[in-house]
Image: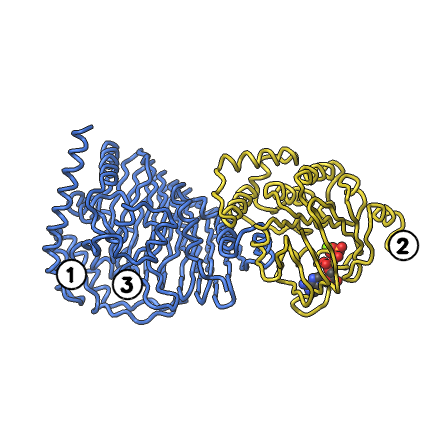
Chain colours: A blue, B yellow
Amino acid sequence: MATEKNKTLKEITKNKYQYGFVTKIESEKFEPGLNENTIKLISAKRNEPSWMLDYRMKAYSALQKMTPPNWANLKIKPIDLQKIIYYSAPKKPKYNSLDEVDPELLKTFNKLGISIDEQKKIAGVAIDVVVDSVSVATTFQDTLKKLGIIFCSMSEAIENHSELVKKHLGSVVPYTDNYFSALNAAVFTDGSFCFIPKGVRCPMELSTYFRINEAGTGQFERTLIVAEEDSYVSYLEGCTAPMRDENQLHAAVVELVAMKSSEIKYSTVQNWFPGDENGVGGVYNFVTKRGICLDSAKISWTQIETGSAITWKYPSCVLKGNNSVGEFFSVAVTNNFQQADTGTKMIHLGKNTKSTIISKGVCAGKSNGSYRGLVKISKSADNARNFSQCDSLLLGQTCGAHTFPYIESSNKSSIVEHEATTSKISDDQLFYCKQRGIPEEEAIGLIVNGYCKDVLKKLPMEFAVEAQKLLEISLEGSVG
Amino acid sequence: MLKIKNLHVSTESNISILKGLNLEINKGEVHAIMGPNGSGKSTLASIVAGDPKYMITSGEITFNGKSLTDLEPEERSSMGLFLSFQYPVEIPGISLNNFIKTALNQKQKALNEKPFSAKEILEKIKKNAEILKIDLDFIKRSVNVGFSGGEKKRAEIFQMLMLQPQLSILDETDSGLDIDALKIVAKGVNSLRNNNSSFIIITHYQRLLDHIQPDFVHVLNEGKIIKSGGSDIAKMLEEKGYDWI
Ligand SMILES: Nc1ncnc2c1ncn2[C@@H]1O[C@H](COP(=O)(O)OP(=O)(O)OP(=O)(O)O)[C@@H](O)[C@H]1O
Ligand SMILES: [Mg+2]
């Protein structure tokens, strides 16, 4: 026991040392602006192999020929890429104690039931000794190692698993895909890599929480998950706590590779700062997420989107293999002045491929929520099936919900079903709840949770409870 | 306990429905209210419970000496007022179990009492489900979604027993119940009645009153109580209809 504890403490001291080290580099922070030199510097700082630099440079030259997409149902002020700082050392703690953190933020933490240590970590408070989280993370890594599972930061992966990364990076989302994927490929500095070997069932939820040395998430994240034949993994991204970040633009790319008969479950809770109740501030979140399924493989995307001023996000599945399955379960909540344009693409290429889309939009305040989805059945996709259910729930008179379903079918044997509803919380429902003693805000929370249940129940257990609370908190003050 | 004085009530669109209604209910009393369709029975129930669809234009309602006019429905609820709805509302995705737990603990919170533990709640659920012969699987279903007419009414009485109100208004709870269910529901009501709770039972039929003996029967017509008396009134109405009055 005693020696184990000593070991942990040693590791902590080591970590603390690293912080000190990081503070030193911080003075070398880049000037704002994007050019070839910026990219060379990023790559050099990270000691990247030359193929990585080549890749970044190609992405950068592709980016220069592209313009930001404008087809989404979003009102966005132009983004000036030259005003962004593309390399700065890992964030050092901003505060010395929780007393310095915005009390509003702490109130939300407490409502979510987040522990004090966790609160410090998320809010960016200096942590002295967090024995628990470090030791949990360490035993966690040991278990994974024994199974041959690789779970590390993208930087470590480029260094230690270069061949694997080289083989799969950009194979699902090429940098030519869109403006933001090109930008990400050129400048990403953070993210996760995960590899599950053949036949291995990952015994625990892989959460970004448990990656050592990981405090906060980056502006240009890059995630790659590779599941070999017959393997299984469930991955959790984000956390229910509100994430404050000064960076306005976030452009992440996530790629999933599901080999024959494997399964990847990818769950996200996105709760970036949405801006205040007057629509000031807030993160612009432009995310490209896509997975490819080989024969009999399955990918499930589950997302709970409550944060960001602007969300532009379409987690998609390319169902290349025969009998492969794609799923998309989404709850997108917008309040105040938030705007979300989110949905999915299901590209059916293989025979007997199946996809399911369940999207629940909840709009309150002066916000705008759009579902945008494409179901594409190619010529080769005999007997492909899709079922889509897109529901919108409006709270109040000043918000807007929109549905843009696109169906392109080139195979007559396919069956595509689409259902859509728009509803409001009825006065009768509210009165019924209130008669039973449940006040209006709680009643709305309850009804919204009920409405989102089909999606919430797809989340891993611990997450589901937090997500329910999160929905209630996101809609606070939406009654009008 | 409940005092209604010269109550006038209109809808939001200014349609006058109750026109000078008086009613007084004391602790432990059971009052039956009968009256033709559209006479204002449900409106009376709704205004007492605080449904914002209706407005008091004059008159007053007090509950235990406190005016209800400016109180939110949930405040009235935590004071011990319960309405079994004529048309219970569906809440998809929320189990009856979860719903009643939330309601119970909201009430505890309003009363500054500590929340019931999961175990305490489960015990209450089991006890009341047994009285009402409700299957525990039924309680896992979404509130009123796909419930049959009779099941909805039984679920209302289940919630009533869980919340132990001081005054319960049952708006046509007997409609849609089969003969056995009627007896079961009456048993539930009577089990509460022994605790000194009061009831307003809105009904069109004598049969429920065979099982729950009312202390008073009132006849409501065109927004006013036009006759009050003992349980014999209900029997006369059953025989002769409203023309008798
Ligand atoms: N929101 C409303 N808007 C307009 N009219 C209403 C409204 N609510 C009730 N009314 C009218 O007021 C009258 C009384 O309705 P109420 O539901 O109280 O009758 P009731 O006595 O309960 O009838 P029943 O026996 O059929 O249940 C009816 O004529 C009804 O149409
Ligand atoms: Mg009625």
Q: Are marks 1 and 3 in contact (CB under 8 Å)?
A: no
Measured as percent of width and height from the top left, residue B141 is found at 57, 42
Q: Nearer the viewer, residue B16 or A443?
A: B16
Q: Are marks 1 and 2 on the same chain?
A: no
Residue at image point 47% right, 66% down: A399
Q: Chain of mark 2?
A: B
Q: Against B86, is A11 above or below?
A: above
Q: Residues within 10 Å of mark 1 (few under 14, many from 20)?
A: many
Q: Are marks 2 and 3 in contact (CB under 8 Å)?
A: no
Give the labeled residue for mark 1. Answer: A39
Q: Is residue A158 visible?
A: yes
Measured as percent of width and height from the top left, residue A132 is found at 25, 38
Give the labeled residue for mark 2. Answer: B244
Is residue B83 rendered to the left or right of residue A45?
right
Place residue B9 in its image quadrant. Answer: bottom right
Ligand 1 quadrant in view: bottom right
The kind of residue on which mark 2 rests is: Trp
Measured as percent of width and height from the top left, residue A147 is found at 26, 32
Residue at image point 40% right, 64% down: A339
CA separation, marks 1 and 3? Answer: 18 Å
Q: Nearer the viewer, residue B189 or B71?
A: B71
Q: Secondary structure at mark 1?
A: helix
Give the labeled residue for mark 3. Answer: A249
Q: Chain of mark 1?
A: A
